[in-house]
Amino acid sequence: MRRREFLFIAVSVLALAAVGCGGSRKKGEPAEVHWDRDMCERCKMVVSERKYAAEVVDPRTDKVHYFDDLGCAVLWLKEEKIPWAKEAKIFVTDAKTGEWLDARRARYTDDSITPMAYGIAAFSDKTFPKGHKALNFDQVVRLIEKIEAKNNERRGVEAQ
C-alpha cells in the first residue's frame, strides 16, 4: 500500500511540474508574459502595458528577454552589443489587439503614449489605423536611436 501511495504522489508531482512549466511554447516563439511581474531587461520597470510590450528571443539559447517598450528592446540590443542581434527573434504586441507580431514585419505609428515615451505602436496590416503614415522596423529603429540621442543630450545639459 505504501509503495502505491508513493508512486501516486511521485507521478502527481511530476505531472504538476510539467503543467506548471507550461511547455507549450515552441522554440523561437514569444513567451507568455507574467504581466506586472516580469521586468524589462533594460530599464528594470515591470512589464505591464499589454499594448506596447516587446520580447527578444536569443536564437542560440531560446532565452526570452522582456521589455516594457519597443524602445527599450532596440536600445538594449545596441547598448549591450548583443552579438546575435541580427538573428534575434523580436516580437511586439499589436497596439489594438495585444497579440504578438513579428517586429520586423509589423507596421508602426510614432504618435502613441508608451511606457518609456518612445511613442512607437505596432500593428498588423489588418489593425493598422487609417490615416496614419506607416513606418517599417528599420525606420522605427532609427527613430528610437534619434530620440535616445536627444534624451542623452538633454541629460548632459541638465547634469552640468
Image (cartoon, rainbow, N blue to C red):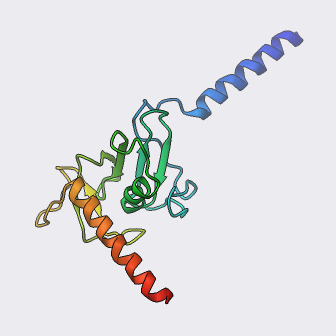
Name the quadrant containing residue 121.
bottom left
Name the residue nearer the viewer: 84 or 106: 84
Residue farthest along the right direction in this orientation: 2
Residue 59 is situated, as x and y percent measured from the top left of the image, at 41, 35
Q: Residue at x 30, y 53 (%)?
A: 94
Residue 12 is situated, as x and y percent measured from the top left of the image, at 71, 23
Residue 144 is situated, as x and y percent measured from the top left of the image, at 31, 65
Instruction: Examine the rendering and report whether any part of residue 31 can be seen.
Output: yes
Q: Residue at x 29, y 70 (%)?
A: 146
The quarter of the image holding the N terminus is top right
Residue 106 is situated, as x and y percent measured from the top left of the image, at 23, 50
Q: Is residue 123 left or right of residue 13?
A: left
Name the residue nearer the viewer: 86 or 11: 86
Name the residue nearer the viewer: 122 or 71: 71
Q: Residue at x 44, y 56 (%)?
A: 76
Q: Is residue 151 left or right of residue 96?
A: right
Q: Residue at x 14, y 66 (%)?
A: 132
Q: Is residue 43 left or right of residue 100?
A: right
Q: Is residue 141 above or below residue 19?
A: below
Instruction: Examine the rendering and report whether any part of residue 107 can be seen.
Output: no
Residue farthest along the left direction in this orientation: 131
Name the quadrant containing residue 29.
top left
